[in-house]
Image (cartoon, grey):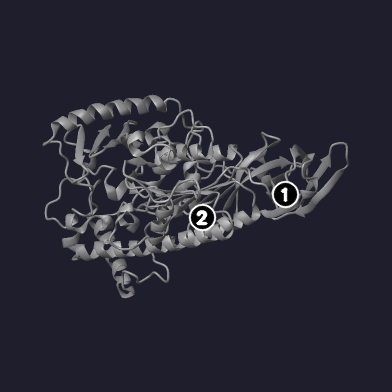
Amino acid sequence: GLWLGTEESLTVEILSITMVPKEAAYADEPAGVRHLDRSNRYRRALFVHTPARIEYPIIVPEGGRLDTALGTLWAEPATTFRVSVATDGGESQTLLEEAYSHRDAWAQRSVDLSEYAGQVVTLALEAESERDGSIALWAAPTVTGSATSGLPNVIFYVIDGGGADQMSVYGYGRRTTPFLEQLAAEGAFFEHAYSNSSWSKPSTTSFMTSLQNSVLGNVRDRFDPLPEEARTMAQRFHEAGYQTAVLTTNPWAATASSLERGVDLLREERARPNTRSSMELHGDFWSWREEYPGMPFWTHFQTTDVHGPTTAQAPFAGLYLPLERRGQLEEWWERIRAWFRETQPGPGTDLLRSSVWEDTGIDRLEFFGTVRDIYDEALFHQDHQLRLFVARLKATGQWENTILIVGADHSTSSAGSWDLAEVLQDSLPPTWGPIFRSYVSRVPLIFVWPGHIAGGKQFTQPVSNIDVLPTLLDLAGLPMPDAMQGRSLAPLLSGQVNEAEFGTRPVILDEFYVEEESGELQGKIEVIDGRWGASMWVGPPGDNPQNQYPVPVLVYDLWEDPFALYSLHEERPDLVEKYTEFLEKQWEAHQALAQHFSSEGEIELTPEQLEALRTLGYIR
């Protein structure tokens, strides 16, 4: 029998088994590029069939070196790797020759080319084996030198689930982010920045492409890949000569969303516990910089330090929540899970408005206060680790020419971030729940670039994460995408214009799925337009009360109601009419733009990726 996680088992009859050699996956090409995993690290690798020789004519820079890693598919027989250099009219000189046979690990190697500085040479990568047709791998072969390219390094540091509402840099009552306060003083920060969706996959793919979730078209299900036509931030910087790395403990920021494209090094292994994420990812970064020390580099961090389930790390455990109360929260969660199993509430059931509190006897105020305490401890830990990371950047001389952006893919997205006075009201409105609720989508956005972005800049106009890609391309002097929905904030950051001259524009948020039975697209498209926020449901509502809007568009006063608890559709029909027309036009534009993109099939996830996504609460 095969256990499928249900109450019944199924009998599976296997009719045949076909054994396919590993080399078969490479049979269609004599050489090519693949992203391959060794010891939970993906490398962008060049593959060849032995015997093979690939030549590159290059001009060797001052202090030239070749950095690469060797790899094989099989332990036996060993593959001999060789690196040689031939000058114009001169003899070939072998600089590296090594037999390697480890199939589960990369062998990092560096070859000194400095004696050829300034010369035009032919660099050859050769591989041979006793068994012809064996696959030899060269991971990210990169030639660099001591001179800088003039391009800035880029670090996009995403705090997964990092809510601006609970950061002291954004006015939170506890001093949870003292280092972010320092960064904001050294650079520029946006008071009202928003993620474009409520969870990691649609949000991360959106800001990596500067395209909205509905435009990208990868909405059939959670594992629908990013269309090939959608060029990612990593691809654009890699094509500009950058070394690229994605370092995350959330697969939605990596291969589960097709975001390995254009990436030389990718790590998506989960941290245990989540709160160790930043520590592990920073270690991966410094190891990568030792292996590939050339400039410039582009790195996307996406840490899960504050993403539940959260376990604070010493010395911050106990900072806000006494250690003896930590076990109480686990016991509460188990009672709540048991209540859900027993009652089996329907779709859209809101934990805040259910009878779980009366039925379990758990004090709602104490419960959410405890959730908040643990989150704040984890946030303080994350802030401290970022402080240590930047200190090392400065100590190694890489800070002055580095653009650092600190952001988040969404806010806390948990009831623990609600203002408790609002939560504990006896009567709450229906849970229509727009994406632009501050505890769902309000995120930090801080830019620092020493000598280029003046310190202490503070901007009040609403912006969103899809503005990050065009801003970075603009700051680095790289070409803009042919299709993008964000706009560059570089004129503001560089001081070319002030906010009044730059002008404001509405922030658009959207999030869509394909309904399984009907095949119809369904979801929300929303706008933040100064004081007002409006949300329109598109498609069949099904049986989820959050999708059963009483009018086509719900409207909220975000100045008076930042948690979007009370829709004004009855008091302000004029606003309903205005934003219905606006959002319908936006939706038409998104559908038109989506025609330029297509999807090529579903991504197959490994058991490790599935487990990591379950741990983060994204799938069951």
Q: Seen in the image, is 268 located left or right of residue 173?
A: right
Q: Nearer the viewer, residue 2 or 577?
A: 577
Q: Amino acid at mark 2?
A: Glu
Does residue 430 appear to the left or right of 210 in the view shown? left
Callout 1 environment at 10 Å: few (<14), some (14 to 19), or many (20+)? many
Residue 66 in the image: state x and y as whole percent.
72, 48
Where disc 1 sits, the SS reads strand
Q: Nearer the viewer, residue 398 or 422?
A: 398
Residue 65, label in figure: 1
What residue type is disc 1 on?
A: Arg
**Residue under numbered circle 2:** 269
**At 43% from the left edge and 42% from the top edge, which residue is drawn?**
493
Label 2 crowd bin: few (<14), some (14–19), many (20+), radius 10 Å: many
For residue 197, which quarter of the picture?
Answer: top left
- Sequence-wise, the earlier of marks 2 and 1 is 1
Residue 289 placement (x, y as % from top left): 61, 54
Disc 2 to disc 1, C-alpha distance = 30 Å
